Amino acid sequence: MADQDVVGEYGINSYIWCAVGAGVGFLAGLMMKSDGRTLLVENILVGVFGAFMGGDFIVSLINGGVVNDKDFKASSLAMAVVGAVTTVAILRLMRHVVGPMRAGKAKAPRN
């Protein structure tokens, strides 16, 4: 009975958003041919964040502030995918503008 209470209280959507976001982030990392584990983990975490933003936050804004964690809806899943893809794309754009990651800070030139 305890397992049903936990799933009933939080709903299954949170677990689905984690899986969707991680999957989108992982696939984006493979498609971009990211060098290193750090970039892949970063893609996965940003994908999970985007899935939560799309699946919960944006859907609740559309529904007038009502968050429905009890029932699974395909429209929420679609928004989670859109949110994950959008945030990973923004991350890629930021990497392109800022440049590659560096191990440490660049030292200021001495005059």
Image: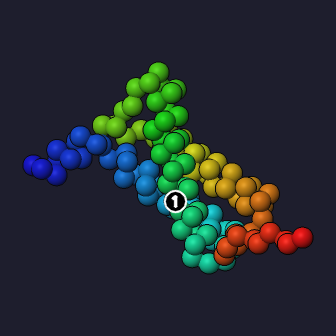
Residue type at mark 1?
Leu
- Spot occupied by residue 16 in the image (x, y as percentages of width and height): 40, 52
> What residue is shown with label 1?
45
Residue at figure coordinates x 12%, y 50% from the top left: 2
> Which residue is drawn at the image coordinates 76% and 72% (left, top)?
107
Q: Would you say 22 lies left or right of 10 here?
A: right
Return the x and y of residue 74 as percentages of the image width and height: 46, 41
Relative to 42, residue 50 above or below:
above
State whether residue 88 appears in this view: yes
**Quadrant of res 25:** bottom right
Q: Secondary structure at mark 1?
A: helix
Residue sitting nearer the eye, 100 or 72? 100
User: Which percent across, then down, holds residue 86?
Assistant: 64, 48
Q: Is residue 35 left or right of residue 107?
A: left
Quadrant of the frame with the C terminus = bottom right
Residue at the image point whose x is 53% and y is 34% from the top: 58
Which residue occupies the extreme front position in the image? 111
Residue most toward the top?
Answer: 64
Q: Residue furthest right?
A: 111
Q: Position of residue 99 (x, y in %)?
A: 78, 65
Q: Is residue 108 left or right of residue 15?
A: right
Left or right, 104 with reference to 60:
right
